[in-house]
Amino acid sequence: MIKLPKKDVAIVGLGWCGSIMAIEMAEAGLEVIAFERGPWRDTGTDFNPGYVQDELRYVIQQELMITAAEDTYTFRNAYDQTALPMREYGSFLLGTGLGGSGAHWSGLTWRYNPSDFVLRSHLTERYGAKAIPKDLLIRDWGITYDELEPFYDKFEKMAGIGGKAGMLNGHYQPGGNPFEGNRSSEFPLPPMAMTYAPTLFAEAAAKMGLRPFPTPSGNASQVYTNPYGVTMAPCTYCGYCSRCGCANYSKSTPQTNIIPALMRRRNFTAQVQSEVLQIKLDASGKRAVGVIYVDASGQHYEQPADLVILTAFSVPNVRLLFASGIGTPYDPISERGLIGKNYAYQTNSAVQAFFDDKNFNPFIAGGGVGQACDEYNGDNFDHSGLGFFGGACIMSNVTSGWPISNRMTPPGTPRWGSKWKVATQKHYLSTTVVRTQGSSYPTRSNYLGIDPTYKDRHGRPMMQLTFDFPDNDLKMSSFVTDKAADVARAMGARQLVAKPAKGPYNIVPFQSTHNTGGAIMGDNPRESVVNKYLQCWDVPNLFVIGGSAFPQNAGYNPTATVGALAYWAANAIRTQYLKNPGPLVHA
């Protein structure tokens, strides 16, 4: 193993969180190195307008995603089952290479509700402590919406998010989301122009007494130059956002919004095609002294650093804690240990709406184009007597009209042959979807662990995922899907096909790359892995940033919350930790 000269900061993962932490640390004058296990990817050379709209390459063959040959997990629905390795990724798709999952996301950009951050306290106050099922491990985050709001605002201005404020400086703004937390400023860009399906959805929802609003979008509605001095171009509605890179500099990505400014800094190094295998600790086990990584040639290196920041996807963050012997692994039988606990996901559903007299032109699309209603999200409605907690955003969000994947046909249609071709042609333009994106609440039986049998290509035990949809979340999905069907019916659909979430959870079909938990944040080391500043309780010069910190997942995409937490943690490091290295919160 080759030992390298020490850096001030070693960052693991160069997606949204890694890019934010890197530029913040570099601006503070620190020598920063960031590791990315995949290749370098640049908009100008890797996302060429001549070929980037390629469904086969990016959607089917998943060029921007990690493959099971490179890294895989084992999976089971319950801890008394035998977990087996995934042969390919399907339910969720982990990005690899510069930008990580931030390069292939769709662009929907939500703030969580104020009650989401104090969920157990909120539900206890409203319904009583006995109303919360014992098996639900929902928790307060240790941070409030008001504390995080300035950093939501900073993320939105960096990413050029378009939308319409609902609550601005304490006052409701017509046309915005009336349920959102208070904002200190308007979105930096206006909403995107609406296509036909979201327009029809909004009209129908409004007639029902709901209050629809444009979905906040990371797809630029206008030319925009962010605070780092990099410029976005207007979205062309090509329909190739999700799972694809953006050739037009229109989708908010690390490549477009941060990396160009970051790479101009001489005190920053991007170390690509290099996978960090372990955090190296000193003899006490209470201080990180660097990381161990392997490059594409198989050579192992030790990179010493005074500060280590994990900014990978949620599951790899947890894996590095396991591999480094930090904390105690969670055991669902004894209920001891914290590493891997509170693993959660997203509980999504859809209502297919078939029309005879509509032309939605689904190929004219953008990842964040849409209209939504929040009446049935979170605790925006009375849950008394319903038998569940949580909720979902209901929306018409037409991400794409991909000609291979997006071929909805009514029940009873053959899966192939001449009749299938006729049905595909008939329904392609005249069918749309009303979607729900629902919360996911952790239980004692859903967790991340280390597989006792299978090893990865580096000889490490594979990560083991144990997950099934809780009964709470299935009841929630059924309820909210019925509400979505009401809106679809009001749109005038001839036929509806409702698809609420069903158990057992299936790892094969794509559902959502919104995995959370495993290294959760909180206000004390007995119940959380990191404190409110994302600083590891056990190793104070280690910060673990990302979806791994979420105690549970809300009914929204997590990207903006992940980004806001990165800015929040970076601010704490710059204004507090660097002045007095050590614990920022004392237990």
Image (cartoon, grey):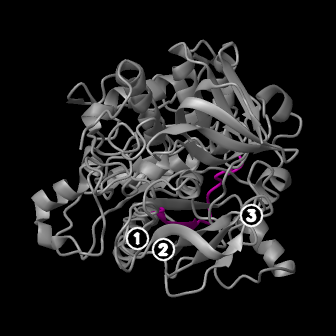
> Mark 1 or mark 3, which has the lower sequence index?
3
- Quote the CA–CA distance across marks 1 and 3: 40 Å
| Disc 2: which residue | 501
Across and down, in percent, residue 513 comes to 58, 56
- Residue type pointed to by label 1: Ser
Across and down, in percent, residue 447 comes to 46, 69
The numbered mark at residue 459 is: 3
Instruction: From the viewer's perspective, tell me whether residue 157 is left or right of residue 195.
Output: left
Q: Quadrant of the C terminus?
A: top left
On whether residue 101 falls in the magenta region, the answer is: no
Closer to viewer: mark 2 or mark 3: 3
Closer to viewer: mark 1 or mark 3: 3
Q: Is mark 3 on a helix, strand or loop?
A: loop
Q: What element carries label 2?
A: loop
Q: Nearer the viewer, residue 587 or 93?
A: 587
Across and down, in percent, residue 106 comes to 61, 45
- Residue type pointed to by label 3: Gly
Q: Main secondary structure of the magenta part?
A: loop
Q: Categorize mark 3 by other alpha carbons within 10 Å: few (<14), some (14-19), many (20+).
A: few
The image shows residue 189, relative to residue 566, as above or below, that is above
The image shows residue 482, relative to residue 171, as above or below, that is below
The numbered mark at residue 547 is: none
Instruction: From the viewer's perspective, tell me whether residue 83 is left or right of residue 346.
Output: right
On whether residue 354 falls in the magenta region, the answer is: yes
Q: Categorize mark 2 by other alpha carbons within 10 Å: few (<14), some (14-19), many (20+).
A: many
The answer to which quarter of the image holds residue 295 is top right
Q: Are marks 1 and 2 in contact (CB under 8 Å)?
A: yes
- Residue type pointed to by label 2: Ala
Residue at left 51%, top 30%? 161
| Disc 1: which residue | 477
